[in-house]
Image: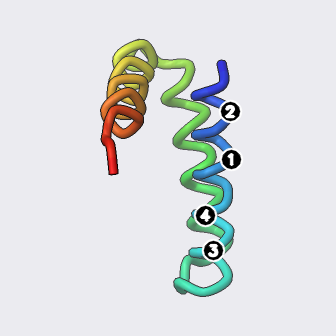
């Protein structure tokens, strides 16, 4: 649960920055959000979630 909340916050910040400074239009951001909702209800959702969890584990395992 903590990983998904952190990912949502990170992605929300990234989208906000892209809208404000990167030239991403608000309409494009809405399309991205809608795509996320449709992907979450699709049969691909478990695989996407597993990949995101594995990437989070990989990043957390990096030692600086």
Disc 4 to disc 3, C-alpha distance:
5 Å
Residue drawn at x 33%, y 51% is: 64
Q: Residue 49 appears at what percent x and percent y?
A: 44, 21
Name the image quarter holding residue 47: top left
- Give the mark nearer the N terminus: 1 vs 4: 1
**Left or right position of 25 against 49:** right
- Give the mark nearer the N terminus: 2 vs 3: 2
Disc 1 to disc 3, C-alpha distance:
12 Å
Residue drawn at x 34%, y 32% is: 61
Disc 4 to disc 2, C-alpha distance:
15 Å
Label 2 secondary element: helix
Q: Nearer the viewer, mark 4 or mark 2?
A: 2
Residue, disc 1: 9
C-beta proximity under 8 Å, tags 2 and 1: yes
Which residue appears farthest toward the front when viewing the image?
Answer: 64
Residue, disc 4: 15
Residue drawn at x 61%, y 33% is: 37
C-beta proximity under 8 Å, tags 4 and 3: yes
Disc 2 to disc 1, C-alpha distance:
6 Å
Residue, disc 2: 5
Disc 2 to disc 3, C-alpha distance:
18 Å
Q: Residue 42 appears at what percent x and percent y?
A: 47, 18
The numbered dot on residue 17 is: 3
C-beta proximity under 8 Å, tags 1 and 3: no
**Left or right position of 59 against 45:** left
Judge whether 23 appears above or below 57 on screen. Answer: below
Label 4 secondary element: helix
- How dense is the environment of label 3, judged by Cα within 10 Å: few (below 14), some, or many (20 and up)? few
Residue drawn at x 64%, y 41% is: 8
Q: Residue 10 appears at what percent x and percent y?
A: 61, 51
Disc 1 to disc 4, C-alpha distance:
10 Å
- Give the mark nearer the N terminus: 1 vs 3: 1
């Amino acid at each position: 649960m903590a990983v998904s909340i952190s990912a949502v916050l990170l992605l929300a910040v990234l989208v906000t920055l892209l809208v404000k400074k990167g030239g991403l239009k608000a309409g494009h951001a809405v399309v991205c959000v809608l795509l996320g909702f449709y992907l979450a209800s699709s049969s691909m959702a478990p695989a996407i979630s597993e990949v995101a969890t594995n990437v989070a584990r990989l990043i957390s395992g990096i030692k600086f």
